[in-house]
Image (cartoon, grey):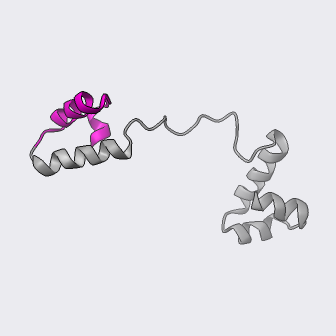
């Protein structure tokens, strides 16, 4: 939004905007292009990064407390504990 303001309202050039925003001139050009093309600064055609978070802070606190009481517990047992107590089914790699 700042880049758009600097460009449209203040008439600043992309080089000056890149200095103000502490980013590359390419990034400024990309943002201005996306806004002109789609009316947004994020590409609506790109795939979103990752999926929704499955494990929340409460789940992490629970896992921490389980590990505090039994630090030698295997990951598959942590996975089972989380599933049984919170109804959250995750891959072991998520717990790592």
Magenta stretch in the rendered image: 73-96
**Residue 11 x, y percent position in the rendering:** 90, 66
Query: Is 40 in front, or is 13?
Result: 40
Query: Is 96 in front, or is 69?
Result: 69
Which residue is painted at 77% across and 67% down in the image? 17
Residue 21: quadrant of the picture: bottom right
Q: Is 35 inside the magenta-drawn segment?
A: no
Which residue is painted at 32% across and 31% down in the image? 90
Which residue is painted at 76% across and 44% down in the image? 40
Which residue is painted at 73% across and 62% down in the image? 25
Q: Is residue 13 above or below residue 50?
A: below
**Residue 71 x, y percent position in the rendering:** 11, 49
Q: Is residue 27 above or below residue 57?
A: below
Q: Is residue 80 above or below residue 43?
A: above
**Residue 6 x, y percent position in the rendering:** 83, 65
Q: Let me know if residue 71 appears in the view.
A: no
Q: Main secondary structure of the magenta part?
A: helix
């Amino acid at each position: 939004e700042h880049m758009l303001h600097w460009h449209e309202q203040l008439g600043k050039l992309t080089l000056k905007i890149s200095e103000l925003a502490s980013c590359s001139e390419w990034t400024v050009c990309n943002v201005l292009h996306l806004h002109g093309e789609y009316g947004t600064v994020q590409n609506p055609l790109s795939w979103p990064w990752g999926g929704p978070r499955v494990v929340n802070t409460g789940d992490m606190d629970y896992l921490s407390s389980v590990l505090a009481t039994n630090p030698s517990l295997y990951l598959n047992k942590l996975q089972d504990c989380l599933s049984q107590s919170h109804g959250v089914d995750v891959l072991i790699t998520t717990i790592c």
